[in-house]
Image: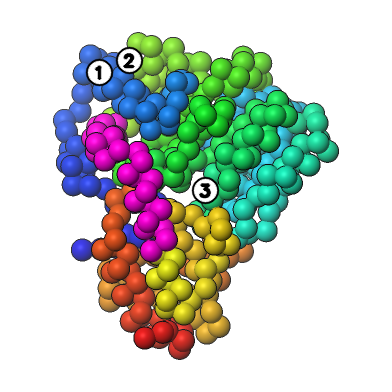
Protein backbone atom coordinates (compact mmCIF):
# COMPACT_ATOMS: atom_id res chain seq x y z
CA UNK A 1 0.00 0.00 0.00
CA UNK A 2 1.39 3.42 -0.98
CA UNK A 3 2.64 5.68 1.79
CA UNK A 4 1.46 9.13 0.67
CA UNK A 5 3.73 11.35 2.73
CA UNK A 6 3.33 14.73 1.07
CA UNK A 7 1.92 17.87 2.74
CA UNK A 8 -1.39 17.39 0.91
CA UNK A 9 -3.53 15.86 -0.29
CA UNK A 10 -3.16 13.54 2.66
CA UNK A 11 -4.34 9.97 3.21
CA UNK A 12 -8.01 9.55 4.10
CA UNK A 13 -9.42 7.04 6.61
CA UNK A 14 -11.54 4.23 5.12
CA UNK A 15 -14.63 5.62 6.85
CA UNK A 16 -14.09 8.98 5.14
CA UNK A 17 -13.65 7.41 1.72
CA UNK A 18 -16.75 5.30 2.25
CA UNK A 19 -18.76 8.45 2.99
CA UNK A 20 -17.70 9.87 -0.39
CA UNK A 21 -19.81 7.13 -2.00
CA UNK A 22 -23.04 8.09 -0.25
CA UNK A 23 -25.89 8.86 -2.70
CA UNK A 24 -26.33 12.46 -3.74
CA UNK A 25 -28.90 14.57 -1.90
CA UNK A 26 -30.66 17.86 -2.57
CA UNK A 27 -28.21 20.57 -1.50
CA UNK A 28 -31.24 22.82 -0.89
CA UNK A 29 -33.11 20.17 1.08
CA UNK A 30 -33.49 19.15 4.75
CA UNK A 31 -30.81 16.40 4.67
CA UNK A 32 -28.11 18.83 3.59
CA UNK A 33 -29.38 21.44 6.05
CA UNK A 34 -28.82 18.99 8.89
CA UNK A 35 -25.32 18.15 7.68
CA UNK A 36 -24.13 21.73 7.17
CA UNK A 37 -25.39 22.82 10.58
CA UNK A 38 -23.70 19.87 12.30
CA UNK A 39 -20.46 20.29 10.36
CA UNK A 40 -20.33 24.04 11.03
CA UNK A 41 -20.84 23.49 14.75
CA UNK A 42 -18.03 20.93 14.85
CA UNK A 43 -15.74 23.16 12.79
CA UNK A 44 -16.17 25.91 15.38
CA UNK A 45 -14.98 23.47 18.03
CA UNK A 46 -11.81 22.67 16.06
CA UNK A 47 -11.26 26.36 15.22
CA UNK A 48 -11.79 27.06 18.93
CA UNK A 49 -14.01 29.97 18.03
CA UNK A 50 -17.44 31.48 18.48
CA UNK A 51 -16.97 33.48 15.29
CA UNK A 52 -18.85 32.73 12.10
CA UNK A 53 -17.39 29.84 10.09
CA UNK A 54 -18.19 29.50 6.40
CA UNK A 55 -17.50 26.57 4.07
CA UNK A 56 -16.33 27.38 0.54
CA UNK A 57 -15.99 24.99 -2.38
CA UNK A 58 -12.45 25.55 -3.64
CA UNK A 59 -8.79 24.85 -2.92
CA UNK A 60 -6.81 26.67 -0.27
CA UNK A 61 -5.79 29.39 -2.71
CA UNK A 62 -9.46 30.24 -3.23
CA UNK A 63 -9.78 30.72 0.50
CA UNK A 64 -6.81 33.08 0.56
CA UNK A 65 -8.36 35.12 -2.25
CA UNK A 66 -11.65 35.19 -0.35
CA UNK A 67 -9.90 36.55 2.75
CA UNK A 68 -8.37 39.38 0.72
CA UNK A 69 -11.33 40.46 -1.39
CA UNK A 70 -13.82 40.36 1.48
CA UNK A 71 -11.85 42.60 3.83
CA UNK A 72 -9.87 45.02 1.65
CA UNK A 73 -10.37 47.73 -0.94
CA UNK A 74 -8.15 48.67 -3.88
CA UNK A 75 -5.41 50.97 -2.64
CA UNK A 76 -5.42 49.62 0.91
CA UNK A 77 -1.95 49.06 2.31
CA UNK A 78 -1.37 45.60 3.75
CA UNK A 79 1.63 44.05 5.42
CA UNK A 80 2.53 40.67 3.95
CA UNK A 81 4.66 38.53 6.25
CA UNK A 82 6.03 35.85 3.95
CA UNK A 83 8.28 32.94 4.96
CA UNK A 84 7.95 30.91 1.76
CA UNK A 85 6.21 30.19 -1.52
CA UNK A 86 2.66 30.29 -0.19
CA UNK A 87 3.21 33.54 1.65
CA UNK A 88 4.50 35.00 -1.62
CA UNK A 89 1.44 33.68 -3.43
CA UNK A 90 -0.90 35.36 -0.97
CA UNK A 91 0.90 38.68 -1.42
CA UNK A 92 0.51 38.36 -5.19
CA UNK A 93 -3.22 37.75 -4.80
CA UNK A 94 -3.54 40.98 -2.82
CA UNK A 95 -1.54 42.86 -5.47
CA UNK A 96 -3.71 41.44 -8.25
CA UNK A 97 -6.79 43.00 -6.65
CA UNK A 98 -5.19 46.40 -6.19
CA UNK A 99 -3.82 46.34 -2.66
CA UNK A 100 -0.55 48.11 -1.95
CA UNK A 101 1.54 45.34 -0.42
CA UNK A 102 4.27 46.13 2.06
CA UNK A 103 6.44 43.01 1.91
CA UNK A 104 8.24 41.64 4.95
CA UNK A 105 10.06 38.75 3.30
CA UNK A 106 11.82 36.36 5.66
CA UNK A 107 14.71 34.13 4.62
CA UNK A 108 13.27 30.78 3.59
CA UNK A 109 13.76 28.21 6.31
CA UNK A 110 13.35 30.76 9.10
CA UNK A 111 10.31 31.99 11.02
CA UNK A 112 9.15 35.60 11.21
CA UNK A 113 10.42 37.61 14.16
CA UNK A 114 7.43 39.22 15.92
CA UNK A 115 9.60 42.24 16.75
CA UNK A 116 10.38 42.71 13.05
CA UNK A 117 6.64 42.69 12.39
CA UNK A 118 6.17 45.33 15.10
CA UNK A 119 8.83 47.51 13.49
CA UNK A 120 7.27 47.05 10.04
CA UNK A 121 3.89 48.17 11.36
CA UNK A 122 5.45 51.17 13.12
CA UNK A 123 7.19 52.13 9.87
CA UNK A 124 3.92 51.72 7.96
CA UNK A 125 1.20 52.86 10.39
CA UNK A 126 -1.37 53.17 7.62
CA UNK A 127 -1.47 49.43 6.84
CA UNK A 128 -4.99 48.15 7.43
CA UNK A 129 -4.24 44.44 7.70
CA UNK A 130 -1.43 41.95 8.25
CA UNK A 131 -1.32 38.69 6.30
CA UNK A 132 0.55 35.83 8.00
CA UNK A 133 1.11 32.18 7.12
CA UNK A 134 0.87 30.10 10.28
CA UNK A 135 2.54 27.01 8.82
CA UNK A 136 4.52 27.26 5.58
CA UNK A 137 4.65 23.88 3.86
CA UNK A 138 7.16 24.99 1.22
CA UNK A 139 9.83 25.41 3.90
CA UNK A 140 8.55 23.32 6.82
CA UNK A 141 8.38 26.28 9.22
CA UNK A 142 5.69 27.24 11.75
CA UNK A 143 5.41 30.87 12.79
CA UNK A 144 4.85 31.87 16.43
CA UNK A 145 1.35 33.04 15.63
CA UNK A 146 0.34 33.61 19.25
CA UNK A 147 3.06 36.22 19.75
CA UNK A 148 2.58 37.67 16.27
CA UNK A 149 -1.12 38.09 17.02
CA UNK A 150 -0.37 40.16 20.13
CA UNK A 151 1.84 42.47 18.08
CA UNK A 152 -0.73 42.88 15.32
CA UNK A 153 -3.73 43.38 17.58
CA UNK A 154 -1.89 45.83 19.88
CA UNK A 155 -1.41 47.90 16.73
CA UNK A 156 -5.13 47.73 15.95
CA UNK A 157 -4.67 45.96 12.62
CA UNK A 158 -6.75 43.23 11.02
CA UNK A 159 -5.05 39.82 11.24
CA UNK A 160 -5.54 37.51 8.24
CA UNK A 161 -4.15 34.00 8.74
CA UNK A 162 -3.30 31.23 6.31
CA UNK A 163 -3.84 28.16 8.50
CA UNK A 164 -4.38 25.80 5.58
CA UNK A 165 -1.79 23.27 6.73
CA UNK A 166 -1.87 23.94 10.48
CA UNK A 167 -5.40 24.21 11.82
CA UNK A 168 -6.65 20.73 12.82
CA UNK A 169 -3.06 19.54 13.41
CA UNK A 170 -1.31 22.35 15.31
CA UNK A 171 -2.97 24.29 18.13
CA UNK A 172 -4.52 27.53 16.87
CA UNK A 173 -7.06 28.96 19.36
CA UNK A 174 -8.68 31.47 17.02
CA UNK A 175 -10.55 33.45 19.66
CA UNK A 176 -7.78 33.49 22.26
CA UNK A 177 -5.34 34.75 19.64
CA UNK A 178 -7.85 37.28 18.22
CA UNK A 179 -7.41 36.14 14.63
CA UNK A 180 -9.81 37.96 12.32
CA UNK A 181 -9.92 35.74 9.23
CA UNK A 182 -8.51 32.20 9.38
CA UNK A 183 -8.41 29.93 6.33
CA UNK A 184 -7.93 26.15 6.35
CA UNK A 185 -8.23 23.43 3.68
CA UNK A 186 -9.89 20.03 3.71
CA UNK A 187 -7.00 18.17 2.05
CA UNK A 188 -4.58 18.73 4.93
CA UNK A 189 -4.96 17.64 8.55
CA UNK A 190 -8.72 17.27 8.20
CA UNK A 191 -8.17 13.87 6.48
CA UNK A 192 -10.56 14.72 3.65
CA UNK A 193 -10.05 14.97 -0.14
CA UNK A 194 -9.44 18.40 -1.70
CA UNK A 195 -12.41 20.62 -2.46
CA UNK A 196 -13.46 22.51 0.66
CA UNK A 197 -12.07 25.52 2.50
CA UNK A 198 -13.22 26.57 5.95
CA UNK A 199 -13.01 30.24 6.96
CA UNK A 200 -13.63 31.87 10.34
CA UNK A 201 -14.62 35.54 10.40
CA UNK A 202 -14.44 37.80 13.45
CA UNK A 203 -16.63 40.79 14.29
CA UNK A 204 -13.79 43.10 13.26
CA UNK A 205 -13.47 41.24 9.95
CA UNK A 206 -17.19 41.67 9.32
CA UNK A 207 -16.79 45.42 9.93
CA UNK A 208 -13.98 45.50 7.39
CA UNK A 209 -16.11 43.45 5.01
CA UNK A 210 -18.90 46.02 5.16
CA UNK A 211 -16.47 48.60 3.73
CA UNK A 212 -14.48 46.36 1.37
CA UNK A 213 -14.66 47.36 -2.28
CA UNK A 214 -12.55 44.71 -3.96
CA UNK A 215 -14.72 42.77 -6.44
CA UNK A 216 -16.18 39.55 -5.09
CA UNK A 217 -19.14 37.50 -6.25
CA UNK A 218 -18.49 33.78 -5.78
CA UNK A 219 -16.45 34.51 -2.63
CA UNK A 220 -18.94 36.92 -1.03
CA UNK A 221 -18.98 36.32 2.74
CA UNK A 222 -22.35 38.08 3.09
CA UNK A 223 -23.95 35.62 0.68
CA UNK A 224 -22.24 32.76 2.50
CA UNK A 225 -23.60 33.84 5.87
CA UNK A 226 -27.15 34.52 4.65
CA UNK A 227 -27.39 31.13 2.93
CA UNK A 228 -25.88 29.34 5.93
CA UNK A 229 -28.72 30.70 8.04
CA UNK A 230 -31.03 28.70 5.75
CA UNK A 231 -28.80 25.61 5.94
CA UNK A 232 -27.33 26.06 2.48
CA UNK A 233 -24.31 27.28 0.54
CA UNK A 234 -24.79 30.09 -1.99
CA UNK A 235 -23.50 27.88 -4.81
CA UNK A 236 -23.52 24.15 -5.44
CA UNK A 237 -21.17 22.68 -2.82
CA UNK A 238 -18.87 19.67 -3.11
CA UNK A 239 -21.53 17.44 -1.56
CA UNK A 240 -19.40 14.29 -1.40
CA UNK A 241 -16.58 16.14 0.31
CA UNK A 242 -19.08 17.51 2.82
CA UNK A 243 -20.11 13.93 3.59
CA UNK A 244 -16.45 13.08 4.12
CA UNK A 245 -15.85 16.11 6.35
CA UNK A 246 -18.83 15.21 8.53
CA UNK A 247 -17.24 11.81 9.21
CA UNK A 248 -13.69 13.09 9.73
CA UNK A 249 -14.86 15.72 12.21
CA UNK A 250 -16.55 13.02 14.28
CA UNK A 251 -13.28 11.09 14.32
CA UNK A 252 -11.25 14.16 15.24
CA UNK A 253 -13.49 15.23 18.11
CA UNK A 254 -13.53 11.68 19.40
CA UNK A 255 -9.72 11.66 19.47
CA UNK A 256 -9.77 15.08 21.12
CA UNK A 257 -7.92 18.23 20.10
CA UNK A 258 -5.19 17.98 22.80
CA UNK A 259 -4.46 14.40 21.71
CA UNK A 260 -4.35 15.41 18.03
CA UNK A 261 -1.89 18.24 18.73
CA UNK A 262 0.25 16.00 20.93
CA UNK A 263 0.31 13.25 18.28
CA UNK A 264 1.47 15.67 15.61
CA UNK A 265 4.14 17.12 17.91
CA UNK A 266 5.36 13.65 18.79
CA UNK A 267 5.47 12.49 15.18
CA UNK A 268 7.07 15.73 14.00
CA UNK A 269 9.86 15.27 16.53
CA UNK A 270 10.22 11.61 15.60
CA UNK A 271 10.58 12.53 11.92
CA UNK A 272 13.22 15.16 12.60
CA UNK A 273 15.21 12.82 14.82
CA UNK A 274 14.96 10.07 12.21
CA UNK A 275 16.29 12.37 9.50
CA UNK A 276 19.23 13.48 11.61
CA UNK A 277 19.99 9.87 12.54
CA UNK A 278 20.45 9.14 8.82
CA UNK A 279 23.15 11.81 8.63
CA UNK A 280 20.92 14.38 6.92
CA UNK A 281 20.28 17.99 7.91
CA UNK A 282 16.99 19.78 8.41
CA UNK A 283 16.30 22.76 6.17
CA UNK A 284 14.01 24.62 8.59
CA UNK A 285 15.44 26.13 11.74
CA UNK A 286 14.62 23.49 14.30
CA UNK A 287 13.21 25.90 16.89
CA UNK A 288 10.32 26.61 14.51
CA UNK A 289 10.21 23.33 12.57
CA UNK A 290 6.71 22.30 11.54
CA UNK A 291 4.90 19.38 13.12
CA UNK A 292 3.02 18.75 9.88
CA UNK A 293 5.86 18.69 7.32
CA UNK A 294 9.60 18.16 7.64
CA UNK A 295 11.93 19.79 5.11
CA UNK A 296 15.27 18.10 4.50
CA UNK A 297 18.29 19.82 2.96
CA UNK A 298 19.89 17.95 0.07
CA UNK A 299 23.52 17.07 0.83
CA UNK A 300 26.23 17.19 -1.81
CA UNK A 301 25.71 14.51 -4.46
CA UNK A 302 22.09 13.66 -3.64
CA UNK A 303 19.77 13.61 -6.65
CA UNK A 304 16.40 14.40 -5.10
CA UNK A 305 14.41 13.58 -8.23
CA UNK A 306 16.06 10.15 -8.38
CA UNK A 307 15.55 9.64 -4.65
CA UNK A 308 11.83 10.32 -4.88
CA UNK A 309 11.50 8.01 -7.87
CA UNK A 310 13.30 5.15 -6.10
CA UNK A 311 11.15 5.61 -3.00
CA UNK A 312 7.98 5.48 -5.05
CA UNK A 313 8.96 2.62 -7.36
CA UNK A 314 10.71 0.36 -4.85
CA UNK A 315 9.13 1.26 -1.51
CA UNK A 316 5.72 2.78 -2.38
CA UNK A 317 6.67 5.89 -0.42
CA UNK A 318 5.72 9.23 -1.97
CA UNK A 319 7.57 12.32 -0.75
CA UNK A 320 7.42 15.92 -1.96
CA UNK A 321 10.24 17.87 -3.58
CA UNK A 322 11.15 21.51 -3.13
CA UNK A 323 9.18 24.34 -4.71
CA UNK A 324 10.41 27.28 -6.77
CA UNK A 325 13.89 28.33 -5.57
CA UNK A 326 14.07 25.16 -3.45
CA UNK A 327 13.51 22.79 -6.38
CA UNK A 328 16.28 20.18 -6.24
CA UNK A 329 17.57 21.56 -2.94
CA UNK A 330 15.22 19.98 -0.42
CA UNK A 331 12.70 17.18 -0.10
CA UNK A 332 9.72 17.21 2.23
CA UNK A 333 7.96 14.60 4.35
CA UNK A 334 4.33 15.27 5.14
CA UNK A 335 3.05 13.97 8.48
CA UNK A 336 -0.37 15.46 9.11
CA UNK A 337 -3.85 14.08 9.50
CA UNK A 338 -3.95 10.29 9.23
CA UNK A 339 -0.43 9.44 10.42
CA UNK A 340 1.17 7.40 13.18
CA UNK A 341 4.61 6.33 14.36
CA UNK A 342 4.70 3.21 12.18
CA UNK A 343 4.20 5.35 9.08
CA UNK A 344 7.28 7.41 9.91
CA UNK A 345 9.34 4.33 10.77
CA UNK A 346 8.53 2.97 7.31
CA UNK A 347 9.58 6.23 5.64
CA UNK A 348 12.89 6.39 7.53
CA UNK A 349 13.61 2.73 6.74
CA UNK A 350 12.91 3.31 3.04
CA UNK A 351 15.14 6.39 3.02
CA UNK A 352 17.99 4.42 4.58
CA UNK A 353 17.91 2.03 1.62
CA UNK A 354 17.19 4.58 -1.11
CA UNK A 355 19.59 7.39 -0.20
CA UNK A 356 22.81 5.59 -1.25
CA UNK A 357 21.18 4.64 -4.57
CA UNK A 358 20.43 8.33 -5.19
CA UNK A 359 23.97 9.54 -4.53
CA UNK A 360 24.22 10.10 -0.77
CA UNK A 361 27.12 8.12 0.59
CA UNK A 362 26.90 9.38 4.14
CA UNK A 363 23.97 7.34 5.43
CA UNK A 364 24.58 6.33 9.03
CA UNK A 365 24.10 2.63 9.61
Closer to the camera, 217 or 178?
Answer: 178
Closer to the camera, 159 or 286?
Answer: 286
For this view, does 153 lie left or right of residue 313?
Answer: right
**CA distance separating discs 2 and 1:** 7 Å
Q: Which residues are magenta?
A: 242-270
The answer to if 305 sits in the magenta stretch is no
Quarter of the image holding residue 64? top right
Q: Main secondary structure of the magenta part?
A: helix
The local secondary structure at tag 1 comes to: helix
Closer to the camera, 235 or 14?
Answer: 14
Residue 231 bears which disc, if any? Answer: 2
**CA distance separating discs 3 and 1:** 32 Å
Q: Are marks 2 and 1 in contact (CB under 8 Å)?
A: yes
Rendering coords of residue 100 (x, y %)? 75, 35
Residue 176's place in the image compared with 166, above or below, is above
The local secondary structure at tag 2 comes to: loop
Residue 148 bears which disc, if any? Answer: none
Residue 127's place in the image compared with 229, above or below, is below
Q: Are marks 3 and 1 in contact (CB under 8 Å)?
A: no
Q: In this view of the protein, can residue 292 be seen by the observer? A: yes
At 55% from the left edge and 66% from the top edge, which residue is drawn?
283
Q: Which residue is mark 3?
A: 135
Q: Callout 1 environment at 10 Å: few (<14), some (14 to 19), or many (20+)?
A: few
Q: Which residue is mark 1?
A: 34
For this view, does 246 lie left or right of residue 112?
Answer: left
Q: Callout 2 environment at 10 Å: few (<14), some (14 to 19), or many (20+)?
A: many
At 34% from the left edge and 22% from the top edge, which residue is drawn?
41
Rendering coords of residue 212 (x, y %)? 65, 20
Residue 205's place in the image compared with 359, above or below, is above
Amino acid sequence: MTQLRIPGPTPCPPEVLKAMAWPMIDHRGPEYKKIIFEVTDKLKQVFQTRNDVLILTCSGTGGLEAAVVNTLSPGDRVLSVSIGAFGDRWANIAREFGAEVVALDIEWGKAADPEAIRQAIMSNPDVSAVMVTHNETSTGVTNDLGTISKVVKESGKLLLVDAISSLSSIDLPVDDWHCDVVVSGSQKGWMVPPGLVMVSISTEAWEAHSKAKMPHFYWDFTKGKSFLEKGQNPWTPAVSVMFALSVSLEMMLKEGLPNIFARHARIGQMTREGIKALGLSLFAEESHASNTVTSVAAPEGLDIKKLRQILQDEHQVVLAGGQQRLDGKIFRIGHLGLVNEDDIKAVISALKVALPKAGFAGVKQ
